[in-house]
Amino acid sequence: MNPLANAQNLASLAYFGPETVLTVGVLSLFVLDLVWKRHPKRVVPLTAAMAVVLLASAVALAISPLQPVALFNRMIVSDGLGTFFKWIFLATAAYTAGIVAHSDEIPSERLGEFYALLLAILLGMDLMAVSSDLLMVYLSLELVSMVSYALAGFRKHDSRSTEAALKYVIYGGVASGIMLFGISYLYGLFGTTDLMLLAPKVRAFSGGLFLQTTLGQSPAAQLAMVVAVVFVLAGVGFKMAVAPWHMWCPDVYEGAPTPFTAFLSVGPKAAGFAVAVRFFGVAFTELRGDAFVNTTTVPWPAILGILAAVTMTLGNLTALGQTNLKRLLAYSSIAHAGYLLMGLAAASVLGFQAVLAYLAIYLFMNLGAFLVVTAIAQRTGGETIAEYRGLIKRAPFTAIAFTIFLFSLTGLPPLAGFTGKYLLFAALLERGGGWYVALAVVGAINSAISLYYYARVVKAMVLDKPVTEAKVAMPGTYGFLMLGSVAALFLFGLYWTPLYTVTQAATRSMLRQ
């Protein structure tokens, strides 16, 4: 570790390049939007937004440190874990910008405003991934949440969009308040919100050696620890759409503009898992070989395992009866949050690594699925499974691509979704023991359940008679994104060694005390 002292904040700016680019880009887009409103051309704000994303990507590539460093008095860090998630966020933003380019849900005169807000969320997610202090975690999470509320209700005259924004605000406000309460408990117990400083204090506290509090190992102190961890997990779990903090997800996904729903299903979810990996991997564990050993009396792996089983089961069983594709994918997203929690519950290098790999794969298969939903809704005016009947005859490539995305979400080989789930299950079985084997069995059963509702959509596209013979034309941008996503899923499904290597390096380079 090479922490920078307080007097070297200017030196910290050298590692803060991507966030600086995004900050300047967001402010510039808001100013330029005043001009674009008079001359609405969709290609102009798209080009500007993509230029900001590409510039931020170039800067991130140029300044990636060889060794992890702590920045700005340890409020944030620059390490392999944060860099990995930044690439996921940048790719998600670029993909979403491509979807928005041809979406009639975002009017041309408001396109600049939409891109500016989208980049503001991107900035917040970047900060979530590199936050090393719980107060910074909270502030960056609130930046993501506040702007997300605005984009969820972006269609001002649509009652569904307004309802989505209102529900999102209510649930988000409650989750944020609970999280802040949990942070206050941790500060009261240990006198710090710095994750790296928390780690040795948590070990001393659990060993009965912590002298700052007179509670020692009393039942009240242990209860306070459990409450603090669960409350912090509530705020992060809200972003991840983990049960029981998932209730906002279906209504928001259905009511928000579909391109933003696509972004919401991947970006903020990945940011939530970035916080969870750093929170548990730094403050509450000690790395011994390939295992993150729990150094506290709080059984957080068991808590995460129970949440994983409940979340995936609830998501998959509820998805069985859905006919609206956005709601079906919302419950699918909840189920996938449960799968990802299995990796966290494994509490090992392979487990955390599997979370990173699965999120990278999830980007292509879930954004691809929402891209198809966006395109079909624009051509047919509907979002139900009935609109997809006979799609193989009306848009063959789109139907085949959607089938690949859905089967990858199920976890069928040789697609990358199988690779992601294989790594998650391998992490559980590596730890061994009846508890982890039972969790893996629950995950396997849920994967089988998910095949049913994904196959319903495929059946409608391939076997059902089309309601009309009219062809469904796709913009070239959409075709390019679908083709790229399909290629990525086959690539990572057949040859996933590079992804494995990158995620392993990112996990091991996480900055620790």
Image (cartoon, rainbow, N blue to C red):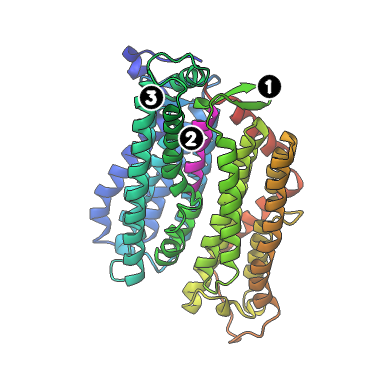
Span highlighted in magenta in the image: 267-281
Q: Position of residue 383 (x, y in %)?
A: 50, 73
Look at mark 3 in the image and give the residue it sits on: 189
Residue 22 position, x and y percent, is 37, 39
Q: Residue 342 versus residue 416: which sits nearer the camera?
A: 342
Is 131 situated left or right of 403 in this image?
A: left
Q: Which residue is mark 1?
A: 289
Q: Is residue 406 visible?
A: yes
The three-letter amino acid code for the residue at tag 3 is Leu
Which amino acid is tagged 2? Ala
Q: Nearer the viewer, residue 17 or 202?
A: 202
Q: Earlier in the sequence, mark 1 or mark 2?
A: 2
User: Picture quarter containing residue 28?
Assistant: top left
| Badge 1: residue crowd in 10 Å (few <14, some 14–19, many ≥20) | few
| Distance (Cα) linking label 1 and label 3 | 29 Å
Residue at 44% from the left image edge and 22% from the top image edge: 198
Quadrant assignment, res 481: bottom right
Are dots 2 and 3 in contact, CB under 8 Å? Answer: no
At 46% from the left and 18% from the top, the residue drawn is 201
